[in-house]
């Protein structure tokens, strides 16, 4: 029996026994199974992330963190913390760039996948692993990065029905999984300012992402440091479903094969900025990935690498455009910066 069949059967039995399950539950279990089974990254996997497209991405993140650390006073020991570090590619490139400016932080990865840990140790042998951020040391400023981490956290969808707000649940129709409104009133789960939306409105929230930002912001306020969150999402409030699944580089039905595809949703950076500020951290801003990388000099870096290795000029510029162009990753992906209250302003925001 395949992993997909096993998880789908578990869901079907659970729904048959207890009734529809929340979309949050469905997404959490499916992604836990998905990320535990194998390496999903790269051309041979299901999707490609920015660090795998070009070393320039990780290098510029490392330079940004080094610049912040230097202008904040070079406090030691500094901690490089990455949430969901993929194959370790971003960390490897960022740490190499930091070292050129005298920053050699202790490396801490928050990761739960055994398969990915092996790849991460190969890329960054000195990394220490933690199941969550609470186990990362409290001594020294944290320099934290999370690239395409928040989008995979369990989503909650709230739908305005004729009877008020209801949570999206997952039920079955025959062998298929379908989304249906739940029976319990959920008006209290929304800010009062948004409860008056018209019937048919769908609003997404992600309590898990809010919890991560709350904890990171508290760490920054207490320890000092800076953080970058890079993900696809929106910087202003919006409505409508963004729940989706990717398998073998193609969008697929998120209810078709739980545990066999990467389930994601767009990140609500507007809400997360408010959470961070409520905890005492500085919100440096949220900008498009293309704008941020241009401000950090990716175009000059691509040209310098091209001069060093002219045989790779076409590939380097192709990778750069994939990262910064509006019809590629440049506009859809956002970069949110956070910092400790006493840390300086940042380049790119």
Image: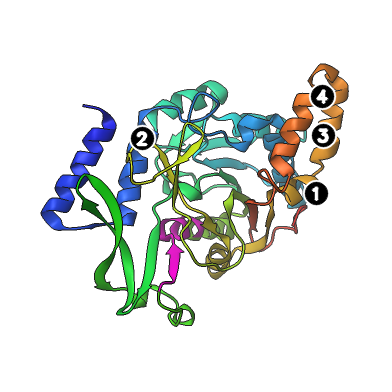
Query: Between marks 2 and 1, how big is the CA–CA gap?
Result: 38 Å
Q: Which residue is mark 1?
A: 295
The residue furthest front is: 174
For the residues bearing labels 3 and 2, Cβ distance under 8 angstroms: no
Query: Between marks 3 and 4, how big is the CA–CA gap?
Result: 12 Å
Count of residue discs: 4
In the image, is 333 to the left or to the right of 318? Answer: left
Mark 3 or 2 closer to N-term? 2
In the figure, residue 101 lies in which quadrant? top right
- Residue 20 placed where, x, y %? 21, 58
Q: Which residues are magenta?
A: 200-213
Question: Closer to the observer: label 3 or label 2?
Answer: 2
- Residue 236 placed where, x, y %? 60, 66
| Magenta stretch encompasses residue 53 | no
* Residue 102, visible in the rendered structure: no
Mark 2 or 4 closer to N-term? 2
In the image, is 276 to the left or to the right of 174? Answer: right
Question: Closer to the observer: label 3 or label 4?
Answer: 4
């Amino acid at each position: 029996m395949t992993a997909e069949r096993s998880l789908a059967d578990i869901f079907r039995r659970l729904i048959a026994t207890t009734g529809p399950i929340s979309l949050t539950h469905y997404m959490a279990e499916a992604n836990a199974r998905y990320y535990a089974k194998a390496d999903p990254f790269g051309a041979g996997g299901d999707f490609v992330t920015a660090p795998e497209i070009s070393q320039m991405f990780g290098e510029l993140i490392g330079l940004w963190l080094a610049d912040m650390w230097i202008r904040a006073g070079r406090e030691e020991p500094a901690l490089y913390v990455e949430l969901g570090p993929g194959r370790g590619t971003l960390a490897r490139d960022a740490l190499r760039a930091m070292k050129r400016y005298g920053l050699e932080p202790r490396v801490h990865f928050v990761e739960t996948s055994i398969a990915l840990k092996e790849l991460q140790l190969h890329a960054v042998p000195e990394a220490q692993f933690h199941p969550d951020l609470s186990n990362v040391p409290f001594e020294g400023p944290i320099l934290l990065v999370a690239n395409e981490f928040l989008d995979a956290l369990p989503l909650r969808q709230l739908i305005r029905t004729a009877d008020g707000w209801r949570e999206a649940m997952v039920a079955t129709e025959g062998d298929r999984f379908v989304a249906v409104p739940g029976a319990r009133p959920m008006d209290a789960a929304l800010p009062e300012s948004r409860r008056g939306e018209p019937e048919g409105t769908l609003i997404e929230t992600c309590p898990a992402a809010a919890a991560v930002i709350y904890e990171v912001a508290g760490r920054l306020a207490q320890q000092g440091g800076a953080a970058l969150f890079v993900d696809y999402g929106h910087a202003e409030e919006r409505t409508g479903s963004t729940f989706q699944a990717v398998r073998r580089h193609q969008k697929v039905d998120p209810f078709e094969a739980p545990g066999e595809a990467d389930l994601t949703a767009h990140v609500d950076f507007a809400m997360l900025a408010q959470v961070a500020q409520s905890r005492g951290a500085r919100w440096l801003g949220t900008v498009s990935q293309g704008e941020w990388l241009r401000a950090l000099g990716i175009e000059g870096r691509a040209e310098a690498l091209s001069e060093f290795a002219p045989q790779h000029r076409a590939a380097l510029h192709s990778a750069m455009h994939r990262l910064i162009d509006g019809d590629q990753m440049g506009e859809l992906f956002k970069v949110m910066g956070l910092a400790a209250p006493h840390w300086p302003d940042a380049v790119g925001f």
